[in-house]
Image: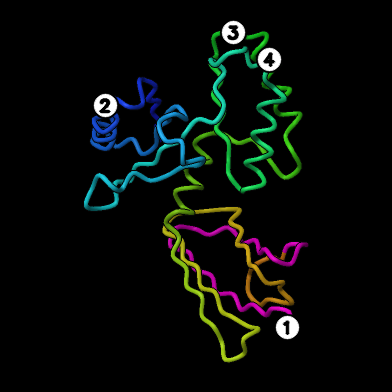
Amino acid sequence: MQIAVYWTNPNEGVLGVVHALRAMGIPFFVTPMTSCQIFRTLFRWDSLFEEDSGLYEFPVTIDDSDSPPLTQRVEQALEVVRANAENGAPNVILIHTNESQGKLLAEEALLRGLPPGVVATDMESFARFWRARDRLRWTAHTAKDPSSMDLDVTSDEAIDGLTIEFQREIADLKGNAKLLPDRRRILLPSLESGGHIHIHIHFHS
């Protein structure tokens, strides 16, 4: 799989770039944050096409080419990461490999300073996870008992680490899913392409 980097003026020619990437079969591309200020995560370009475009864009959150140098912005960058973590949003950090000393120190400091529960991953793994998450099909069925429900999830693509959050506290569940300690989230098992899981959930009254 390929990931393209689109780094010209975000207000000029983006539609042409999107069409070109689609024609070349490149499913993911990266742009500066200024191209879409309202988005903070991967999103799908479907408004341009009558069918599923298959194109996803990564808005870059932190760019090492901005001023001042990244070595002087580590704490500021970590504040952004912490704020996004509170909202469940990822961060895309762009570090150019044109200088090996200061940038390496800045990257190491960023990794050491990540808040609890936030992990670093590569772009391709994240892209594949987000696309699979975006294409999930799920149905919630309410039962006669208002404290219970059934959840069916089908994945078109392989996915691992999918978590589903509920507003109500969960008392118990049946099915191949793990109830997390906060009792409001469940962790689904790894699903293969076309995989399906059925879960019965009972909430506290």
**Marks 3 and 2, how far apart at CA:** 30 Å
Query: Residue 201 is drawn in which quadrant?
Result: bottom right
User: Which residue sits at x=58%, y=56%?
Assistant: 162
Q: Position of residue 124 (x, y in %)?
A: 49, 36
Spatial separation of the CA atoms under disc 4 and disc 2: 33 Å
Assign the N terminus to one quadrant of the image. Answer: top left
Q: Which comes before the other along the chain, label 3 or label 2?
A: 2
Say what amino acid the circle numbered 1 marks. Answer: Ser
- Does residue 6 appear left or right of residue 40 in this picture? left
**9 and 58: which one is in front?**
9
Amino acid at dot 2 = Gly
> What is the x, y in percent for residue 156?
41, 59
Residue 96 vertical placement versus 39 (above, below): above
- Circle on res. 205: 1
Q: Amino acid at mark 3?
A: Glu
Residue 100 location (% of width, % of height)? 63, 9
Q: Position of residue 202 (x, y in %)?
A: 67, 80
Please state if 192 lies on the left or on the right of 52 as rendered.
right
Q: Which residue is mark 4?
A: 71
Q: Residues within 10 Å of mark 3 (few under 14, many from 20)?
A: few
Q: Is residue 85 left or right of residue 39?
A: right
Q: Nearer the viewer, mark 3 or mark 4?
A: 4
Dot 4 lies on which element?
helix
Q: Report the magenta residues as a range.
A: 180-205
- In the picture, residue 43 is in which quadrant? top left
Looking at the image, residue 188 lies above or below residue 174 = above
Mark with earlier residue (3, 4): 4
**Residue linked to disc 3:** 99
What is the distance, in whole Å, between disc 3 and disc 1 at their CAs?
58 Å
Give how far apart the Cα atoms at labels 3 and 4 are. Answer: 12 Å
Residue position for label 2: 13
Circle nearer the N terminus (2, 1): 2
